[in-house]
Image (tube, grey):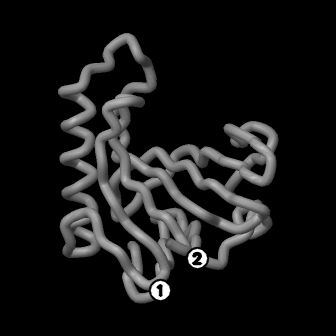
Amino acid sequence: MIDTQTGRICFDSGFTVTPLTVIDDIAGFVDFEKDKVLENGPWKTYSIRNMSLCGRPISLSISFEDNRIRSLHMSCASGSESWADYSTAKEFEIKAANDRLLEDILGMKPSQCFWWGIVESSFDSKTGDAGIVIRYGS
């Protein structure tokens, strides 16, 4: 669930983030040794495995700047983690699933701005990736 009034996101497991989330708040859900994807100066990005939102499996990455949450990147799981069967057509199917997820849980078409940030669904032709991005503090 995403609360459009507050920016609070509650995943099916009970894992919750808000615009005020800090790294220590995710400690019970992240194996910091295994799940850290990228560390670049003040930026740290974590991938959290086996997540679901409103009953739908998703992939999830959370980025922090100087310990404070800045963005989430999630995508309806495609069932494949291999580039061997990648296709732009499959990514557009994932984008459509992402759009449906946002419409079902928010009653909105992507993109939308709120006082606490931005929610958008997009396909990035440079990276070949479809995803839902939630940016806090925008």
Q: Residue at x 37, y 82 (%)?
A: 4
- Dot 2 alpha-carbon crowd within 10 angstroms: few under 14, some 14 to 19, many 20 or more: some
In the image, residue 105 sits, relative to residue 120, either above or below, namely below
- Residue 116 is situated, as x and y percent measured from the top left of the image, at 49, 80
Q: Are marks 1 and 2 in contact (CB under 8 Å)?
A: yes
Query: Which label number is shown at residue 19?
Result: 2
The quarter of the rendered structure image containing the N terminus is: bottom left
Q: Amino acid at mark 1?
A: Thr
Left/right of residue 10 with respect to residue 132 in the rendered view: right
Q: Residue at x 38, y 11 (%)?
A: 84
Number of labelled discs? 2
- Residue 89 is situated, as x and y percent measured from the top left of the image, at 18, 27
Query: Which label number is shown at residue 6?
Result: 1
How many angstroms separate mark 1 from mark 2 (CA)? Answer: 8 Å
Left/right of residue 85 with respect to residue 89 in the rendered view: right
In the image, residue 74 sits, relative to residue 2, either above or below, namely above
Instruction: Identify which residue, 132 or 125, lies in the foreground.
Output: 125
Q: Residue at x 52, y 46 (%)?
A: 50
Quadrant for residue 55, please give it. Answer: bottom left
Left/right of residue 130 with respect to residue 127 in the rendered view: left
Quadrant for residue 53, please give it. Answer: bottom left
- Dot 1 alpha-carbon crowd within 10 angstroms: few under 14, some 14 to 19, many 20 or more: few
Q: Amino acid at mark 2?
A: Pro
Instruction: Identify which residue, 109 or 103, lies in the foreground.
Output: 109
